Amino acid sequence: MKEKIIKILELNRGEWERIEELLKSKLELFIGKLILLPDQLTDKKNILEKYGIGFISGNGTCFRPSKPPRERIKVVEKWKERKVEMVERVIRSGQTYRSKNHLIFTNRINRGARVYGEGAIVVLDEFEGELIGEGPFLIVLKNYGTIIYKGEELEPGKGELVVLTERSGNE
């Protein structure tokens, strides 16, 4: 027997009105999660299925793709020279940190905080938030959070060291 954690997203009315735009621009946030589909919006299920996003509706209809749609995430360029940002403060719950540069975090990243990085990311303290990384590598010394690297979500951490590279991938 294997325990699994299922993440369910509930969208507001405005997000439902622009669901296709959201899926095109932020697909990595939806992969591996189920969307709660209100009964009155069943017309949106075709859009979710088109992008390979799982959903569950109030009437019991459920769709869950067998594998996340990796091929939909395209790499724009292989390597780009970037600056390095040293982040020496705690990233607190509710805060979001975005950067196109390489990132080195010397303090903890709390649960509820989000980090989006296009360059390499190194976290030298406890990590409990959500991290979406697209750079050439990612290192987290004490992972307790959620990591999405190159479009694939890792199992939630239990305090272990995480090292991911473009070559090792997440396959």
Image (tube, rainbow, N blue to C red):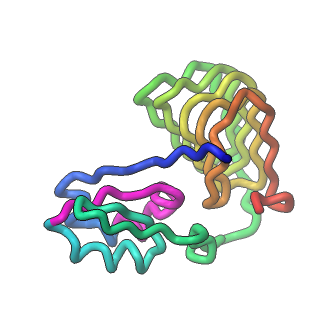
Please state, as top left, top right, bottom left or bottom right, where the C terminus lies in the image: bottom right
Q: Position of residue 157 (x, y in %)?
A: 67, 35
Q: Is residue 78 left or right of residue 68?
A: right
Residue positioned most to the right = 167
Toward which corner of the image does residue 19 lie, by quadrant? bottom left
Q: Quadrant of residue 86?
A: top right
Q: Residue at x 21, y 60 (%)?
A: 38
Residue at the image point whose x is 62% and y is 71% from the top: 70
Name the image quarter holding residue 72: bottom right
In this figure, what is the number of numbered marks? Answer: 0
Rendered position, 3 above or below 118: above
Question: Seen in the image, is 109 located left or right of residue 54?
Answer: right
- Is residue 171 in the magenta section? no
The residue lying furthest to the left in this view is 40
In the rendered image, the vertical position of residue 74 relative to residue 119, given as above or below: below
Q: Is residue 66 above or below residue 157?
A: below
Residue at point 59% right, 19% down? 89
Q: Is residue 161 left or right of residue 88?
A: right
Residue sitting at the far front = 1
Q: Position of residue 42 (x, y in %)?
A: 22, 72
Q: Provide residue 36's location: percent of width, then percent of height.
A: 31, 56
Tell me if residue 76 comes above or below residue 131 in the rendering: below
Magenta extent: 22-39
Is residue 28 rendered magenta in the image? yes
In this view, the residue in front, 130 or 8, is: 8
Tell me the residue at 60%/34% (across/down): 145
